[in-house]
Image (cartoon, helix red, strand yellow):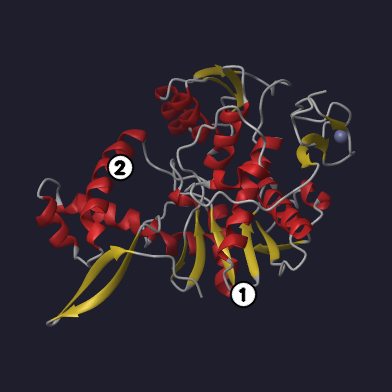
Amino acid sequence: METDKNYKFKCIKCGFESYEEVLKCPRCGGPIQIVYDNLEWVIDSKIPSMWRYKSLLPKSDKIISFNEGLTPIRKIFGVLCKLETNNPTGLYADRASSIIVSSFKNKIIETRYEEDFTLSLAYYSKKAGIKLKVNVIPDNVDPQDLIIIAKLGSDISFINEMEKMELEYENPYTIEGLKTISYEIYEKNPKVEKIYVPAQSGTLVYALSKGFYEIKQIKKDFNEYELIAVKLRHSNIPEILNYSKYKIKISEVSSKEALESMIHLSKKGFNLKPLASSAYALAKIEGNGISIITGNRKISMHESKKYSELKKDIMNIFSDNKKRTAYEIWLELNKYSLKGIYKSLNMMVNNGELCEEPILRGERKIKVYWKCEDSLL
Ligand SMILES: [Zn+2]
């Protein structure tokens, strides 16, 4: 038994406990979560990432972070959205990846391919110098993902059935990473009643429920949010949600509603899947809440590198806090195409890094951009 840890691994279903790391319950096969002996709300507010809550996260000798988390909350077509698109790879899964690579002391991680999760983990593993082995069932993979994962230096093995020993998306470290979304919402304290979360496997919404449950234990005066798992109609209710200690309401939207929201959000440059648009779809109907936007799928890592240079240049010229049009930015930088500037500005608005507003200049309606502060209602 390790004594320096103030937490243990506990099966969500049957209650099996261990101070040794377990990723899946050896007794019933159920999901494992980390349970702390005592919780204290201590924030290191100097840290501009989810690691500001490190006293409430698994201990790590060496934290590997690329400033994931602390994502902005912005209004998109009138709906407040927490933009996980603002994470390093554009995906909410970066929160999980950071905890995983920080916690795994052996320098090889063997994982099962799961959309988004594996992409993010491949990126983090490369940056952390950890070898990632990805097991892929050939009929169940996005080929574009495979190319990116291979480019990031991960080993890919094609298998016929799931391996027992591999790290799956649903694991105690993923839950710890994702629960920080709740911490951030609590810290920001937006005046809303509901939190809408897309739900398929249920891991994300379960993690948020754990985060809120922990806050409830620490802060007796916590004004609870109504946590809503939004699934697509005809999909199953994820089993893990039955075990949450924080009340989760289950709602659903039709495929039509999700697709309409997906198209609607694409007008702001979001590249979402129907499931990822489901929470937004319900938030738009019911209101009074924040919708979690889980991630923008970036087309390729190559593009994102080029984009990150341009983005840095754009952020630099906005350090004077003045408003500018795309054309003015293009003139000032004088080294990119106007089309490239427009594309980047659009992405930066989606990521919550810039704000935009149409204004009239003479007869013409033009858009101005500026570096925005968080504006919450
Ligand atoms: Zn169990």
Q: Which is nearer the N-term, disc 2 or disc 1?
A: 1
3D distance between C-alphas at marks 2 and 1: 36 Å
What residue would you read off at disc 2?
Answer: 308
Residue 305 in which image quadrant? top left
Q: Position of residue 143 (x, y in %)?
A: 46, 30
Q: Nearer the viewer, residue 243 or 39?
A: 39
Q: Three-letter amino acid code at disc 1?
A: Glu
Could you tell whether 370 is left or right of 173 in the image? left
Q: Secondary structure at mark 1?
A: helix
Extreme-bottom residue of the structure:
363
**150 or 100: nearer the eye?**
100
- Judge left or right: residue 168 versus residue 145: right
Mark nearer the viewer, 2 or 1: 2
Give the residue at x 56% y 25%: 138
Q: Residue at x 59, y 51 (%)?
A: 43
Determine crowd level at label 1: few under 14, some 14-19, many 20+ residues with C-alpha closer than 10 A: few
User: Quick check: 308 above or below 214?
Assistant: above
Sort mark 2 into few (<14), some (14-19) or many (20+) by Cα contacts within 10 Å. few
Disc 2 marks which amino acid?
Ser
CB at disc 1 and ligand 1 closer than 8 Å: no
- Residue 48 to residue 305: above or below: below
Report if residue 31 is visible in the image. yes
Name the quarter showing ligand 1.
top right
Mark 2 element type: helix
Is 237 on the left or on the right of 150, as rendered? right
Q: Which residue is mark 1?
A: 286
Q: Is residue 155 above or below residue 46?
A: above
